[in-house]
Image (tube, helix red, strand yellow):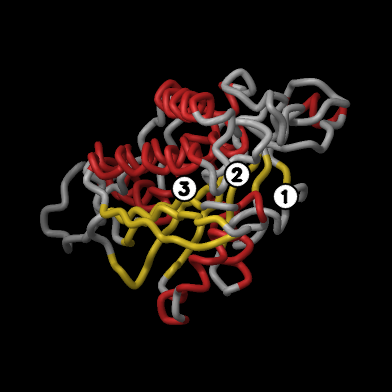
Amino acid sequence: MKLLLSGRALTAAAVAVATLVTGGSTAGAATVPTQPAAAAAPDISAAAVKAHLAQLQSIATANGGNRAHGRPGYRASLDYVKAELDAAGFTTRVQQFTASGRTGYNLIADWPGGDANQVVMAGSHLDSVTSGPGINDNGSGSSAVLETALAVARSGYQPTKHLRFAWWGAEELGLVGSRSYVNSLGSAERAKISGYLNFDMIGSPNPGYFVYDDDPTIEKTFKDYFAGLGISTEIETEGDGRSDHAPFKNAGVPVGGLFSGADYRKTSAQAAKWGGTAGRPFDPCYHSSCDTTANIDDTALDHNSDAIAYAVWELSQ
């Protein structure tokens, strides 16, 4: 990953250069206070994200081929993610709801510390459709968010803002889990969420690089990251309002996120820009039994996972 300096890091560097240009001495001069360089986001290992995907695939295989709401594969997926977070020192809780006559579950994980009145959230839906294991949709987003959370713990990161991560149930039934969570919050609690970042399908096998155009600050954060890699992005339109950011947005919470494409077809211009095959869907296995670990583009998964970490670090400092 190409490391990008935050605004605070650039300010500190500029002060250091100015000192050198003026002779390297500040004797007799007023002391100029400087801020410490902001913490840089770590490189998220694509291999680690794929190891989580392999676990989700194994869970689906052992539970009727899917990880859908109300099915044993979903609860096993949630238990896997929760165990990883508990071992890393997160405070986790499981929120129950009912949809289509079955009990559903959200998993919420808080990293200790930070200003509880300024909460940065990153989330993804953990359920699949009944027809397949849901490895790109949405094991990819779920695994990348999980590995980002674990990177927070490994680094001992202590941001200014409070960090919260979430895995939603029953998204495939109409955003049921995320809506249940948002509705459970009072207006004062919703107002404390300074941003919700959503990641739904980030490893499509014929990928595009799409950024939500909702909150300008969050949008710019993602665009700046990809610009640093020399990757052009486009505004996300295919899934607009169709994923778990929608309940947050409707409640007045600033939202943003990433997407690599579903069943829309890649244009010739997009293929020229991003590679891949024009005229084919971004994900030919969308909502199908072939959405397995073989249905992932490693490069897109790697870039998007690193972008998640970059945004989490940048927006929480």
Task: Identify residue for label 3.
Answer: 311
Q: Does residue 309 appear in the picture of this structure?
A: no
Residue 97 on image: x %, y %? 49, 63
Cα–Cα span, label 2 and label 3 = 16 Å
Residue farthest top in this picture: 294
Mark 2: few, some, or many residues within 10 Å (few <14, many ≥20)?
many
| Disc 1 packing (10 Å; few <14; some 14–19; many ≥20) | few
Which residue sits at x=41%, y=31%? Answer: 44
Q: Is residue 154 left or right of residue 284?
A: left
Q: Is residue 17 left or right of residue 28?
A: right
Mark 1 and mark 3: span between their CA atoms? 20 Å
- Identified at 54% across, 48% down, the residue is 70
Q: Which mark is residue 77?
A: none
Q: 229 or 207: which is nearer to us? A: 207
User: Residue under circle 1?
Assistant: 239
Disc nearer the start of the sequence (2/3): 2
N-terminal label among 1 and 3 = 1
Residue 139 or residue 46, whichever sits in front: 139
The numbered mark at residue 200 is: 2
Q: Are marks 1 and 3 in contact (CB under 8 Å)?
A: no
Q: Is residue 156 above or below residue 280?
A: below
Q: Give the mark toward the camera: 2 or 3.
A: 2
**Helix, strand, or loop for circle 2?**
loop
Q: Amino acid at mark 1?
A: Gly
Q: Secondary structure at mark 3?
A: helix
Check the picture and name the quadrant holding the C terminus: bottom left
Residue 35 is situated, as x and y percent measured from the top left of the image, at 26, 56
Q: Are marks 2 and 1 in contact (CB under 8 Å)?
A: yes
Q: N-terminal of the two: label 2 or label 1?
A: 2
Seen in the picture, residue 305 relative to 223 is either above or below; the reply is above
- Three-letter amino acid code of the residue under disc 3: Ala
